[in-house]
């Protein structure tokens, strides 16, 4: 993928954690988990469209001091002394993008993934971001989800709710979870219909270049095998180029049934952050970012957004570069 010049950053100071407890705030999708399974899809849509009249764009200044530019189109690589330092920088990066897109288009569309990503977002729960971010303008969906009940330990929704969503005042109607009462195929169809409605309501932009939905920010992790979302090395779904959302019943990583955004949707994004921590992922990082030639690309190497790609690595993950 070409060479990178690596910038190693460190955190100057720490900020005390200030969690918010909102006993009155229970997302609609969460409350449904505790009640009888609904007969209707659990994709809750805004009926009011977001204003498309953008204000004068502001110039976005990267929050990452010393960002190292790689080859054109390959993204920026950030290496941090520790995961703690990475999480501090990731919070500012996300908050700055939130402010930028809310000023430009009146909403901020964020795509979450599972794994350790949610833990790395914890600094957004501290001052100044907890108070300064306009959480009411956030719209949250998932790049992939396991087809399990929302209160199941394998649910990406539960992971995000417990570790992040329940601690910030994002309106329940702006949180788009899958309908876990459906089959994998049905859940994928339903989620794609949900996404198309969000595009019709101008909550999510449509890429003029690709014709696929264009999210403001995708926050992605990567598995030790180089997979992203539920797009695994060597699996036919890596090549899916028509659907917005598809399903998998034979995931090499349990649980086997999942739904996932496809690469055309992922790569239509305005911004993508690849957040990768730990020595267990160093081999895949080296293969993705090193100079060696490989005939078979890892899924993470296919990530190439219309906008800007930023790699957030801790030193263990970057140890073989």
Image (spheres, helix red, strand yellow):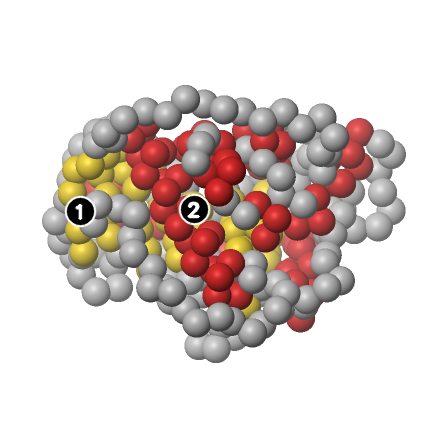
Residue 244 lies left or right of residue 37; in this view the side is: left
Q: x and y percent of residue 92 in the render?
A: 37, 42
The residue singled out by tag 1 in the image is 66
Q: Nearer the viewer, residue 292 or 110?
A: 110
Q: Which residue is mark 2?
A: 95
Give the left or right position of residue 226, taking residue 72 as reference: right
Q: Residues within 10 Å of mark 1 (few under 14, many from 20)?
A: few
Rendered position, 165 above or below 258:
above
Please give the label number shown on residue 89.
none
Q: Is residue 286 visible?
A: yes
The answer to which of 2 and 121 lies nearer the viewer is: 121
Answer yes or no: do the residues labelled 2 and 1 have beta carbons within 8 Å? Answer: no
Name the residue at the top extreme: 16
Determine which quarter of the picture holds residue 321: top left
Q: Is residue 228 left or right of residue 260?
A: left
Q: Is residue 118 left or right of residue 64?
A: right
List x then y, in percent, for residue 155: 61, 34
Q: Residue at x 41, y 46 (%)?
A: 94
Using the rendered image of the protein, determine whether residue 227 is visible from the camera's viewpoint: no
Q: Secondary structure at mark 2?
A: helix
Residue at 84 percent across and 32 percent down: it is 35
Quadrant in which the N terminus appears: bottom left
């Amino acid at each position: 993928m070409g060479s990178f010049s690596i910038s190693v950053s460190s955190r100057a100071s720490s900020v005390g954690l200030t969690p918010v407890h909102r006993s009155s705030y229970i997302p609609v999708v969460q409350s449904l988990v505790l009640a009888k399974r609904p007969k209707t899809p659990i994709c809750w849509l805004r009926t009011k469209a977001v204003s498309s009249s953008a204000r004068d764009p502001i110039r976005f200044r990267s929050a990452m001091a010393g960002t190292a530019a790689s080859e054109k189109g390959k993204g920026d690589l950030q290496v941090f002394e520790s995961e703690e330092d990475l999480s501090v920088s990731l919070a500012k990066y996300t908050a700055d993008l939130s402010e930028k897109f809310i000023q430009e288009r009146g909403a901020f569309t964020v795509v979450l993934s599972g794994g350790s990503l949610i833990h790395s977002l914890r600094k957004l729960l501290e001052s100044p971001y907890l108070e300064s971010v306009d959480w009411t303008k956030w719209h949250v969906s998932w790049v992939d989800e396991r087809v399990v009940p929302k209160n199941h330990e394998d649910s990406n929704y539960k992971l995000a709710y417990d570790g992040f969503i329940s601690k910030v005042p994002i309106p329940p109607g702006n949180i788009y979870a899958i309908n876990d009462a459906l089959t994998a195929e049905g859940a994928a169809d339903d989620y794609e219909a949900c996404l198309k409605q969000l595009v019709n309501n101008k909550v999510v932009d449509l890429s003029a270049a690709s014709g696929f939905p264009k999210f403001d920010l995708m926050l992605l992790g990567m598995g030790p095998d180089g997979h992203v979302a539920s797009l695994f090395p060597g699996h036919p779904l890596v090549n899916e180029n028509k659907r917005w959302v598809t399903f998998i019943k034979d995931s090499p990583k349990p649980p086997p049934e999942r739904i996932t955004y496809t690469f055309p949707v992922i790569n239509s994004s305005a911004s993508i952050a690849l957040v990768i921590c730990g020595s267990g992922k160093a081999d895949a990082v080296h293969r993705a970012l090193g100079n060696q030639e490989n005939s078979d690309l890892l899924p993470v190497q296919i990530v190439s957004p219309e906008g800007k790609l930023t790699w957030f690595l801790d030193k263990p993950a970057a140890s073989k570069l």
